[in-house]
């Protein structure tokens, strides 16, 4: 339950206590080794995994396969790609619906520079994942369901003009919202900001989904009628938001809150209703690199898993989310800084200074040491937990060009956003 709630450090403490009481508990030892990897404690994870391989309690083929898969993950993270590939190919899937195996295999092939094999493994991963999702969430695959199956609030310019003027927090008393389509660099931005003593972030949380559910329990159509919210309603919703935040982190009230959740870009109307003076940082990255990176992820979210079922659907989801964001920007005109991943990589100190200036911070220096700060945190609850502990690098730039043939089908869909953000599709760009 703790792990499902995102409290992995507490999960580790419980497993350590259980193993101290019962050293022969195979499942606890294996799970703890996986938790250590998830907390970026690679050496401890590998010591435990190798000890398990030599222990008689690992007596079944399924248990040995599980240990070998963990060792393959560790080899991949340590750059031993040939070993990771060999282990994964020899072991095969852990069970009949083990699509995670094919995501791992796809990542390994990609890093080995074998795009054809990577794409073949990823197709299998998504086919198996979709079979499971169709059972768990069949509504995501109905013909009328959009590529990104999210209920988007609809606020027209006329409806916005009917919003009552309420007393609202100023920008310093409002959270800083980091948004963008997943895999656009939002976690990197979050770790940079969290490294500054004047800012405090938290792992991704669907706070505005929960606030919307609270509202909809009173009026199912309220999200399209936000003008009905009065001062007392907005005050209560802000209080509830702060209560949820304080349940997740020990709040430092002398630091400004940073709320990073990529798909908060779909909750802009509600966010703006509560925090109209908040600053937004929109993470932007080459749409093709974003699509490829998303396709390679084994997202736990059913909504994102459904959106990533195939490249054409994923491209439609990306364009739909961006269209919705741009539409709301035209209506609300919030205070937004666009942070291009390519610009950040090209001039990390300069781009960091620009972000600091936008947020009214005097000293950007702490943000330059974000990787050390991220390592010290131990646990980061996003798919890029193993990347943001490294300094900024160019590894993620133009990866999509190795898969250019696969992207021929989706470039027409992406073309409006490529044009809007000024990205080229030339391989040598």
Image: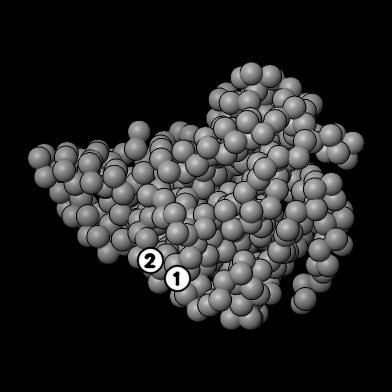
Q: Is residue 389 visible?
A: no
Towards the viewer: 293 or 120: 293
Q: Is 188 above or below relative to 25?
A: below
Which type of secondary structure does the marked residue at label 2 adopt?
A: helix
Residue behind mark 2? 375
Image quarter of the C terminus? bottom right
Residue behind mark 1? 371
Which residue sits at x=70%, y=45%?
Answer: 272
The x and y percentages for residue 201 are: 49, 56
Which type of secondary structure does the marked residue at label 1 adopt?
A: helix
- Farthest residue in the right direction? 158
- Farthest residue in the front direction? 167
For the residues bearing labels 1 and 2, Cβ distance under 8 angstroms: yes
Could you tell me how many numbered marks the image carries?
Answer: 2
The x and y percentages for residue 270 are: 69, 38
Which residue sits at x=71%, y=64%?
Answer: 337
Towards the viewer: 13 or 53: 13
């Amino acid at each position: 339950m703790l792990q499902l709630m995102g409290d992995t450090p507490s999960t580790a403490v419980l497993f350590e206590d259980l193993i101290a009481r019962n050293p022969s508990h195979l499942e606890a030892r294996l799970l703890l080794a996986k938790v250590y990897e998830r907390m970026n404690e690679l050496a401890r994870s590998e010591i435990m995994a190798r000890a398990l391989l030599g222990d008689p309690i690992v007596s079944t083929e399924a248990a040995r396969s599980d240990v070998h898969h963990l060792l393959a993950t560790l080899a991949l993270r340590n750059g031993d790609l040939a070993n990771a590939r060999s282990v994964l190919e020899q072991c095969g899937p852990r069970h009949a619906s083990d699509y995670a195996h094919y995501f791992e295999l796809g990542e390994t092939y990609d890093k080995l520079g074998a795009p054809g094999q990577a794409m073949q493994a990823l197709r299998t991963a998504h086919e198996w994942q979709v079979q499971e999702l169709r059972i768990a969430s069949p509504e995501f695959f109905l013909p009328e369901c959009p590529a990104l199956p999210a209920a988007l609030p609809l606020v027209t310019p006329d409806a916005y003009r009917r919003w009552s003027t309420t007393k609202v927090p100023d920008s310093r008393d409002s959270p800083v919202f980091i948004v963008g389509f997943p895999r656009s660099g939002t976690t990197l931005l979050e770790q940079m900001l969290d490294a500054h003593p004047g800012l405090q972030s938290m792992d991704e949380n669907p706070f505005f989904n929960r606030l919307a559910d609270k509202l909809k329990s009173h009026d199912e159509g309220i999200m399209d009628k936000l003008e009905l919210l009065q001062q007392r309603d907005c005050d209560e919703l802000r209080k509830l938001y702060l209560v949820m935040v304080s349940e997740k982190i020990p709040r430092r009230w002398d630091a400004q809150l940073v709320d990073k959740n990529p798909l908060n870009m779909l909750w802009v109307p509600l966010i703006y209703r509560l925090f109209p003076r908040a600053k937004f940082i929109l993470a932007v990255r080459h749409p093709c690199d974003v699509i490829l990176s998303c396709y390679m992820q084994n997202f736990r979210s059913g909504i994102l898993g459904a959106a990533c079922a195939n490249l054409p659907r994923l491209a439609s989801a990306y364009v739909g989310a961006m269209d919705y964001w741009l539409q709301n920007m035209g209506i609300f005109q919030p205070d937004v800084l666009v942070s291009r991943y390519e610009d950040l990589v090209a001039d990390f100190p300069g781009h960091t200074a620009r972000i600091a200036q936008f947020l009214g911070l005097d000293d950007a220096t702490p943000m330059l040491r974000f990787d050390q700060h991220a390592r010290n945190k131990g646990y980061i609850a996003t798919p890029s937990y193993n990347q943001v502990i490294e300094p900024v690098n160019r590894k993620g730039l133009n990866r999509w060009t190795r898969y250019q043939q696969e992207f021929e089908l989706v470039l027409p869909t992406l073309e409006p956003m490529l044009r809007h953000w000024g990205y080229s599709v030339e391989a040598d760009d």
